[in-house]
């Protein structure tokens, strides 16, 4: 396992509401969607940027609940969720913050960077949308990575970890979550070029799918 100085400090849960939600939702979710976890030993304790493929709306819930309660995971979530009055109150208290998809959201980028620099961990789906049959549910485009995930990883020095999540989340059927080893992008200069950011984002997404034996978008890898 990879270690940093932050690994040695005591990590506390995000707050009492998160702890309550973690155990209550965790019990329900483990019944509905039992999970087989692989590669947890690859996961650093802090300043981690988790980069999973996005196959279901259940993904962030399942992923957050298989991690330790004190993992301090922040989640970049679509802004539409925050239009609900109840969710707009609950979500920030369990680590989620809104991002406007389809354009550059400076505030969400700042929030993401602050979370990692504070020693916490962050979840971003590189594809930015749920992928069904290889196509993005929001943009209608073939599955692809957005460069922003690499930009945040590089600017914060986060340990970028690819994560594979099984596509179909059928109730009462076991699903897989596989953590890979941290990926370090190769860049020039302090922040790298736009081309390097896109290449790094593409690679972290490729690695995530490859953990599950798939190509980007979900098709099986050729043997």
Image: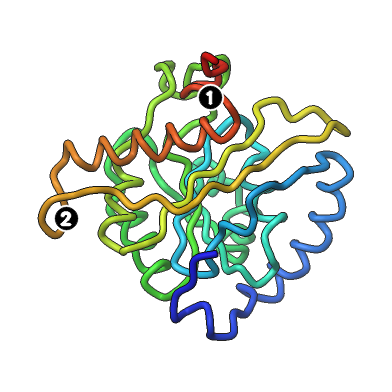
Spatial CA span between label 1 and label 2: 29 Å
Which percent across, then down, holds residue 177?
Answer: 66, 42
The residue positioned farthest toward the bottom in the image shown: 9
The tag on residue 131 is: 1
Image quarter in which the C terminus is found: top right
- 204 relative to 16, above or below: above
- The residue that appears at 44% across and 75% down in the rendered structure is 4
Which percent across, then down, holds residue 61?
Answer: 67, 48
Which percent across, then down, holds residue 192?
Answer: 15, 50
Specify whether 140 is left or right of 13. left
Mark 2: secondary structure: loop
The residue positioned farthest toward the left in the image shown: 189
Q: Nearer the viewer, residue 192 or 90?
A: 192
The answer to which image quadrant residue 199 occupies is top left
Q: Nearer the viewer, residue 98 or 127?
A: 127
- 198 relative to 98, above or below: above
């Amino acid at each position: 396992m990879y270690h940093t100085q932050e690994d040695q400090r005591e990590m506390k849960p995000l707050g009492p509401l998160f702890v309550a939600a973690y155990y209550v939702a965790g019990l329900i979710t483990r019944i509905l969607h039992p999970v087989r976890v692989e590669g947890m030993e690859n996961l650093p304790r802090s300043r981690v940027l988790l980069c999973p493929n996005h196959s279901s709306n259940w993904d962030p819930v399942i992923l957050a609940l298989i991690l330790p309660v004190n993992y301090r995971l922040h989640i970049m979530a679509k802004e539409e969720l925050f239009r609900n009055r109840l969710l707009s109150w609950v979500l920030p208290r369990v680590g989620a913050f809104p991002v406007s998809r389809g354009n550059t959201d400076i505030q969400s980028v700042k929030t993401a960077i602050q979370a990692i620099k504070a020693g916490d961990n962050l979840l971003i789906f590189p594809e930015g949308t749920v992928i069904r049959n290889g196509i993005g549910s929001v943009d209608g485009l073939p599955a692809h990575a957005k460069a922003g995930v690499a930009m945040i990883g590089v600017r914060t020095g986060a340990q970028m970890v690819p994560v594979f999540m099984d596509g179909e989340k059928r109730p009462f059927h076991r699903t897989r979550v596989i953590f890979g080893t941290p990926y370090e992008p190769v860049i020039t200069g302090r922040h790298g070029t736009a081309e390097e950011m896109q290449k790094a984002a593409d690679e972290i997404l490729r690695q995530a799918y490859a953990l599950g034996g798939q190509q980007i978008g979900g098709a099986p890898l050729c043997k």
